[in-house]
Image (spheres, coloured by chain):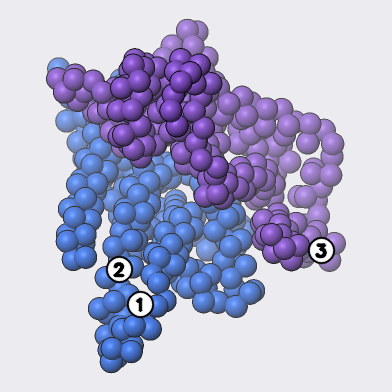
Amino acid sequence: MTTLARTRRVASGLSGYLGLVALILIILALVATGVLSQRRWEPFGDIRVWRFVLEGLLVTLQIGAVALVASLILAVPLALGRLALPRSVRWIVVAWIELVRATPVLALILILTLFVPRDLVSPVWSATIALTIYTSAVLAEILRAGILAIPRGEVDAARSLALTYAQTMRLIVLPQAFSRMMPALVSQLITLVKDTSLASIAAVSELAGYARSIHSFYGNPAETYFVIACIYFTINYTLSRIGRRLELQRAKEPPVTLPAEVEAANPQLPV
Amino acid sequence: MFGRITLDNFEYFVQGYLTTIALSVGAMAVALVIGAVVASLRVWGGRVPSSLGVFYVEFFRNTPLLIQLFFFAVVLAPRNLGITAEPFVVALIGLSLYTGAFATEAIRSGILAIDPGQVEAARSLGLSQLATIRLVVLPQALRTVVPPLGNVASALIRNSSVASAIGTRELLFMGLLVANRTFSLEPLVGVLLGYWSLTLTLSVVLSRLERRLAFAR
């Protein structure tokens, strides 16, 4: 790649951040000229307010990270169940996935936080479970698409080489399916980060809930929500840049190499 | 008997259901217009309109809808811009702008999917500009755009539930109202059935439409 082309690509990647910086500079200029009330922006010059915001951000990231890991684990049996279970029981998995995907996330969060007893499960965990239920159903569909995109011949070849079904899945199919689903996974992660804000409606104090505390103390709701939106934007835009890079990498990927375990099991494999 | 509470408060559910439909249909219509305009700016516009389009899409796509709705509710309120304090209108504006960002991306990918060589070929065969658009460009663009726009519409129906947070009396809001009054989980089951009926109907209609469009290939 020429230097110019690279510079151009980096510049286009930074343009979102630059737009954000420009927006903030415009606001600062408006504050300086007295068009916007300086008093309402003043709290954000205070380090203690930022320490408070950081506290909320950590709760948001915790909910997001736990829900992501749990959904990834749950998505595998859901996807395999939909693909491989006998027809008589498969419809249960299909119905579960389709109904969960057709449900508003906010309704799921409210149902769990309102009706799971608080002394049994705290609202933060109820909200995390609700987000996990939703995200795992979506990821199961993404994973299923990834599995279906793998040529049938690879599975047949693996089974002919005497690999069991579990080995075929673990060594041949799932690694490729996961690498195929990476871009879609990242965009679902962005949705998940945005959806954590819904937990604030169920009285969970994460970033959006902390925003409410800040503006009810300082009386500056519009300014506070703008600043909080910028924080979400920075996280999610960074994620979307990573997702785009992964997509580009996939386009020029080296040919698949066999896992060492398969190589070891079949030393004289003629290639 | 299960279902009793839902039936006793049926008018609340009907009102909420209709509000959800009105909100979704209205926001989708506005979002399609926004999407068509911004996607055109991004594909054919100059450098400045195009980068403004990028910034609009990225900003609205990457921030939570809830925060956007709270922001608009405050900014549009009488003591600020003084445009409206009506939750339904605020929700309609917020949902349209949020969904418009996703519609833009769907429509843009549809425009980019058509090989410019096809337009040149159609023109060389003597088709008029209008005939080229009507017979060559539109059928193909529509086919590539329908599935992603269908997903956008389905997400919109589910996202419209977030409007309950700013006091729009849509399906989830009404369900919570009845649930609070009766201390029961049952109204929320009714709410879920309502949303499922909408999203599942939409997905059936869309898959029919896709099949028909695929046939025209």
Q: Are marks 2 and 3 on the same chain?
A: no
Q: Residue at x 79, y 44 (%)?
A: A44
The residue that mark 1 highlights is B118
Front position in the image: A20 or B40:
B40
The residue that mark 2 highlights is B140
Front position in the image: B173 or A190:
A190
Do tag 2 and tag 1 residues touch (Cβ < 8 Å)? Answer: yes
Badge nearest the viewer, 2 or 1 = 1
The residue that mark 3 highlights is A29
* Residue at the outermost top position: A120
Q: What's the distance in space between the residues labelled 2 and 1, CA to CA?
A: 11 Å
**Colour given to chain A in the rendered image:** purple
Q: Looking at the picture, which amino acid does disc 1 mark?
A: Gln
* Horizontal arrangement in the rendering, residue B100 relative to residue B76 (left or right): left
The quarter in which the C terminus of chain A is drawn is top left
Q: Residues within 10 Å of mark 3 (few under 14, many from 20)?
A: few
Q: Position of residue A125 (x, y in %)?
A: 52, 18
- Whether residue A71 is visible, yes or no, is no
Q: Secondary structure at mark 3?
A: helix
Q: Position of residue A229 (x, y in %)?
A: 63, 46
Task: Give the mark, 2 or 1, whose residue is nearer the N terminus.
Answer: 1
* Horizontal arrangement in the rendering, residue B158 relative to residue A7 (left or right): left
Q: Secondary structure at mark 1?
A: helix
**Colour given to chain B in the rendered image:** blue
* Horizontal arrangement in the rendering, residue B161 relative to residue B136 (left or right): right
Q: Residue at x 40, y 78 (%)?
A: B117
